[in-house]
């Protein structure tokens, strides 16, 4: 079974294909694109060790001459140094303007490969083969690419859409449980911002999802990608609507920053953010306390944190929010639920109200 979604961006449109056993079929799919025979697979040793052979076999059996480029595993390697290695390998092996890069891995590999593709020879094609839940429902779709700078995360980047997103849910079987749950935070986010039915499904089908039952996984990944694809096709460069994807992220990013990216995975920090931002929405009478409670319960049902840790300095969370690259002229903007399945963007939130939420 394979599901397909189209990301509608005129001449930059592309498909997202989701299914099981997809890694063995990537080669024949790539043959239908006008890529030169020389392509490169970018991955890290962890993911390559698990799936590299299968993907390479499929690609080489389809007649491609495929170079492997491995960068060290970890967010700390999503930087300009790794990028430099990628460029050197591509140049040494004479990849040309119609070559393509294939990103096999989580969001780190996807982001850096996309950035390399967007700049190598002024821009070549790339394909996303995401292997974490976060990458499958979020980072592989939408064309945001980039690397970190020592002065800030994702500060160097481009918008560059992939030609294809190829998702194999089987890869989730080897993903550490904590990473899976962190990805679930983004899925819950899609339910809250745009799809009450997805929210209900997550509630009702928790067992099958956590047991990695394929139909259930395909369903939630498909709905998540559809929502992201829809938002991105209406607002590719985040001039407005795309900001709704930041629900839970204003507080979430501040939590990540204040805890120096060591205490929480991104999704875990976003889970705390979603709960507190739901509380903020409740305080502003956008939603009832029942609705805020339903959001918190679902977050906790997936084993995710919902509260700020004791001892974390609330004032530093607040000041970190003001420094976020998404804060405009010092004014805090929040994406707040108005019911499950719909959100509103609220600008100029009163700092005192926010302080009460953080201190509760
Ligand atoms: N471009 C975007 O729109 C966007 C959106 C959200 C996040 N991001 C970026 O994504 C990155 C986080 O991505 P992530 O959460 O996927 O982390 P990640 O890429 O670091 O992957 C997490 C860990 O899981 C391992 N792994 C990956 N797939 C596996 C598998 N199938 N089995 C076993 N292990 C596996 C990885 O090697 C890594 O150790 C961040 O850099 C973030 O900035 C980008
Ligand atoms: Zn996120």
Image (cartoon, grey):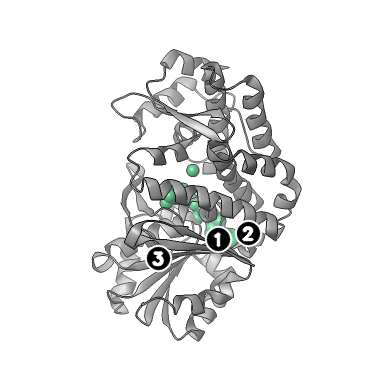
Spatial CA distance of label 3 from label 2 is 23 Å
Residue shown at 36% from the left, 56% from the top: 9
Quadrant of image for the C terminus: top right
Q: Secondary structure at mark 2?
A: helix
Q: Are marks 1 and 2 in contact (CB under 8 Å)?
A: yes
The answer to which of marks 3 and 1 sits earlier in the sequence is 1
Q: Residues within 10 Å of mark 1 (few under 14, many from 20)?
A: many
Mark 3 or 2: in front is 3
Q: Secondary structure at mark 3?
A: loop
Please give the count of numbered marks on the rendered protein: 3
The residue that label 2 is drawn on is 172
Q: Please identify the quarter of the rendering in which residue 334 is found.
A: top left
- Of residues 273 and 86, the one drawn nearer to the viewer in this rendering: 273
Residue 331: % across, % down: 34, 23
Quadrant of image for the N terminus: bottom right
Within 8 Å of ligand 1, the CB of disc 2?
A: yes
Q: Residue furthest right?
A: 207
Q: Please identify the quarter of the rendering in which residue 274 is found.
A: top right
The residue that label 3 is drawn on is 163
- Of residues 247 and 251, the one drawn nearer to the viewer in this rendering: 247
Q: Which mark is residue 131?
A: 1
Residue 263 seen by the camera: no
Q: Which mark is residue 7?
A: none
Looking at the image, is 318 positioned above or below residue 140?
Answer: above
Q: Secondary structure at mark 1?
A: loop
Q: Residue furthest left?
A: 122
Residue 6: % across, % down: 47, 59
Residue 21: % across, % down: 63, 71
The answer to which of marks 3 and 2 sits earlier in the sequence is 3
Spatial CA distance of label 3 from label 1 is 17 Å
Within 8 Å of ligand 1, the CB of disc 1?
A: yes
């Amino acid at each position: 079974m394979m599901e397909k979604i189209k990301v509608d961006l005129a001449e930059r449109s592309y498909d997202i294909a989701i299914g099981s056993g997809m890694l063995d079929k990537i080669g024949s799919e790539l043959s239908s694109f006008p890529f030169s025979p020389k392509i490169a697979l970018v991955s890290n040793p962890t993911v390559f060790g698990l799936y590299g052979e299968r993907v390479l076999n499929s690609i080489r059996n389809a007649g491609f001459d495929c170079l492997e480029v491995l960068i060290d595993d970890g967010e700390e390697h999503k930087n300009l140094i790794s990028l430099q290695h990628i460029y050197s390998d591509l140049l040494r092996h004479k990849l040309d303007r119609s070559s393509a890069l294939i990103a096999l891995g989580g969001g780190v590999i996807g982001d850096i490969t996309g950035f390399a593709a967007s700049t190598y020879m002024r821009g070549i094609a790339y394909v996303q083969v995401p292997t974490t839940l976060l990458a499958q429902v979020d980072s592989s779709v939408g064309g945001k690419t980039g690397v970190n700078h020592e002065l800030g995360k994702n500060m160097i980047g481009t918008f560059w859409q992939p030609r294809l997103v190829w998702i194999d849910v089987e890869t989730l079987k080897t993903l550490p449980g904590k990473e899976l749950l962190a990805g679930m935070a983004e899925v819950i986010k899609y339910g809250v911002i745009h799809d009450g039915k997805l929210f209900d499904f997550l509630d009702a089908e928790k067992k099958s999802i956590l047991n990695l039952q394929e139909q259930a996984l395909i369903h939630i990944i498909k709905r998540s990608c559809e929502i992201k694809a829809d938002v991105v096709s209406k607002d590719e460069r985040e001039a407005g609507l795309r900001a709704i994807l930041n629900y839970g992220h204003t507080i979430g990013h501040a939590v990540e920053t204040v805890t120096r990216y060591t205490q929480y995975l991104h999704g875990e920090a976003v889970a705390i953010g979603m709960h507190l931002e739901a509380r903020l929405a409740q305080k502003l009478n956008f939603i009832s306390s029942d609705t805020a409670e339903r959001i918190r319960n679902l977050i906790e049902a997936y084993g995710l944190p919902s509260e700020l840790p004791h001892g974390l300095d609330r004032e530093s969370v607040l000041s970190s929010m003001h420094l976020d690259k998404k804060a405009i002229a010092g004014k805090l903007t929040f994406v707040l639920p108005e019911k499950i399945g719909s959100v509103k963007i609220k600008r100029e939130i009163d700092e005192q109200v926010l302080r009460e939420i953080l201190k509760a």
